[in-house]
Amino acid sequence: MFSKESKAIQRSVSFSNMALSSCLILPGDTTVISSSWDNHIYFYSIAFGRQQDILMGHDDAVSKICWRDGRLYSASWDSTVKVWHCAPGETLSSKKHHFELLAELEHEVSVNTINLNAANTTLVSGTKEGTISVWDVTTATALHQLPCHSGTVFDVAFSPDSRHLLSTGEDCCFKVIDVQTGMVISSVTTDEPQRCFKWDGNTILSGSQSGELLIWDLLGGKVTERLKGHTGAVMSMWMNEQCNSVITGGEDKQIIFWKLQY
């Protein structure tokens, strides 16, 4: 845990002897959830400074987790995405959660990334073989399965109005997909793989394999600004709602805080 004010590590904890793939803080800022390549999902109490719980819900590495309205969505290399209801335990002494599996979305190959639309009704998944799948969360059915990329899908997200999807992959391409029809409506080729991104429907901020942050004009299909940062691939990115503060994490073991001015 890193303090932005003091610019120092306040606390560290080891969950596993394997890599952690995804991390998020629950609403209320009291619990951290981390997924790992050891097939497990770990719940850590910030207030009590200890591991609260372990969800052993997959048969292979957990690649990505999302949290929306009391539900946990977990993607795994076991070719599934699972939806869980997580309720805190009744007794203060145990601090254990109750996990109920609500849905299981079956894929043919390993799932590398997921995301949800603003209403939490539609989920998108990206696989290691380049397929983008769009799912109706309420019925747990696939709406579209699209072979968009050649190679792993690194990141995927809905536009703010949930009408379009943007994906990036190992094949050095951005793809824009119409959610309703499932058609690829735009493709932008990049000089190198873009590992993660944030976008507002028009402008993209992406983290590259080489460590740069790139600002893209999506309609023009070109880079408008390059920001030097990491010395290795940018592996994760967070942006605030105002789109002016960004935090990135890289293969170089660095966390960088950015202030953006468009």
Image: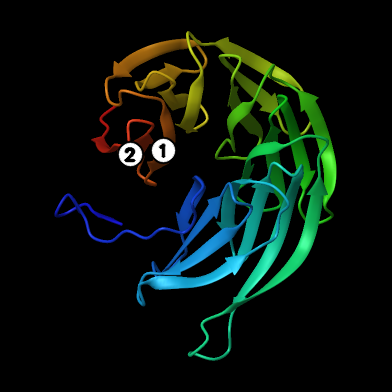
Q: Secondary structure at mark 2?
A: strand
79 relative to 185, above or below: below
132 relative to 114, above or below: above
Q: Amino acid at mark 2?
A: Val
Q: Are marks 1 and 2 in contact (CB under 8 Å)?
A: yes
Q: Amino acid at mark 1?
A: Met
What residue is rendered at 81% in x and 31% in y? 145
Q: Nearer the viewer, residue 84 or 181?
A: 84
Q: Is residue 216 left or right of residue 230?
A: right
Q: Report, in whole angstroms, how far the alpha carbon at label 1 lies from the one at label 2.
A: 7 Å
| Image disc number at residue 246 | 2
Q: Residue 47 sits in which quadrant?
A: bottom left
Q: How far across and down, in percent of the image, does residue 184 sit?
A: 72, 19
Foreground label between 1 and 2: 1
Q: For the C terminus, give its image quadrant.
A: top left
Between discs 1 and 2, the one toward the N terminus: 1
Say few, some or many: other residues with alpha carbon within 10 Å of mark 1 (under 14 / 14 to 19 / 20 or more). Answer: some
Say few, some or many: other residues with alpha carbon within 10 Å of mark 2 (under 14 / 14 to 19 / 20 or more). Answer: some
